[in-house]
Amino acid sequence: MLKKQRSSRIGIITTLLLSFVFGMFGTPGHAGAKEAKIGFVLSMTGAAAVYGSTQINGAKMAIDEINAAAGKDGVKIVALFEDDASTPQQGINVFNKFIKADNVALLIGPTLSNTAQVTDRIAQQEGVPVLAVSNTVKGLTDIGDYIFRDSLTEAVVIPNTIKIAKEKLGVSKVAVLYGNDDAFTKGGYDAFKKALGDAKIEILSEQTFAKGDRDFSPQLTQIKGKNPDAIIVSALAEEASGIVSQARQLGIPKTIPIIGGNGFNSPSFMKNAGEAAEGVIVGAAWNSASSSPLTRKFVADFTAKYNGPPDQFAAQAYAGVYIAYEAVKKAGSPDNRKAIRDAMAQIKIFDTVLGKFSFTAVRDADHLPIVQQVRGGKFVVFGE
């Protein structure tokens, strides 16, 4: 009898212990976590805020859609948003916080390549996957195997832009103007220079400026005197609008087209440059006029939600959230950083608003670039 009572007490104690353990960690064979914690490091202030604001809107819309579809039983995204202030130091602070204090499963951002070149090294060292949704500088993913991006590099977009410009406009000689104190704009210049050389297009003049400059008339006057077939500009949106406006004010006619880098891909550029923006040509990763059902729905829903159409940066952020979530699902774990990294590397021909999306062997974006032109205050596909 005593033996039976002792056995019964042991059984009760065992049951209580197991209940406690499974209550804390989940039953065997089932993931304890039902949430994927993602840290979004984007520019809410500073020079890149014009891009960061639309990135946040695109990301939040995707998160809302995914969490609604997940229902009560599926894995949901817990999103943490922080401002990188468009500076590397603040980006470093946020990355460290997200990785070490908040224990995020993966990171999306930062907005600028300047910041990414330093922050991504922290993530690589700590073994946390990063998905860049706007960084285009050459060689970013060389930092390591935890670094991915869904943003096409300038090295992919710009050669296509120059090829189309030469074919359709007969461009044979150009002048170049670029920001030489930012990785984003300097990377664009490097890609333009190589593409122009490969296309056998002569560079008549190279002029530079710094972030925050307001007066571009000395450089543009030099350029005007060279009488180029086109003006190549690598600039962030704020400087881009000033350059284009002042070029037309100085009497450089619209028969001399301005061809911009990725920084031009913002509605704020067209808004600030106004009529002067008409005819500007820019390479891009996405155009809102695409006939893709996913793009049509995205544009309609985004416009209704935010009272204005999305730009390329919103589309890349929106697609980035879906790509990250696909990796979480394929990993079979919402908080295993290595499993998520391994799963992300395997994503191929995945349907997104950017088109059929894959990662290359070095974790760069693989989908078709396009060339846009400003017409009627909107970006349209060049030549259509």
Image (cartoon, rainbow, N blue to C red):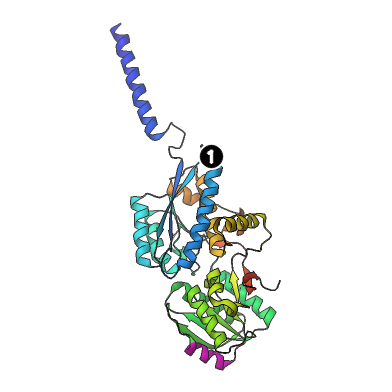
Foreground residue among 27 and 90: 90
Count of numbered marks: 1
Q: Main secondary structure of the magenta part?
A: helix
Foreground residue among 297 and 222: 297
- Which of the 4 image quarters holds residue 18? top left
Among all residues in the image, which is located at the extreme top? 1
Among all residues in the image, which is located at the extreme front? 307
Foreground residue among 348 and 215: 215
Residue 108, position as x, y percentages in the image? 46, 57
Q: Is residue 225 magenta?
A: yes
Residue 158, position as x, y percentages in the image? 58, 73
Q: Quadrant of the C terminus?
A: bottom right
Amino acid tagged 1: Gly
**With 306 as the anchor, is 336 left or right in this view?**
left
Specify the segment rendered in magenta.
Answer: 217-228
Q: Is residue 187 visible?
A: no
Q: Is residue 296 visible?
A: yes
- Which of the 4 image quarters holds residue 156? bottom right
SS for tag 1? loop
334 versus 134 height, above or below: above
Q: Quadrant of the N terminus?
A: top left
Among all residues in the image, which is located at the extreme bottom? 225
Mark 1 Cα within 10 Å, few/some/many (few <14, many 20+)? few
Q: Tell me which residue sits at (41%, 61%) in the image.
A: 120
Q: Is residue 205 magenta?
A: no
200 versus 51 height, above or below: below
Residue 133, position as x, y percentages in the image? 50, 61
Q: Tell me which residue sits at (40%, 61%) in the image.
A: 83
Residue with the mark numbered 1: 71
Residue 222, position as x, y percentages in the image? 51, 91
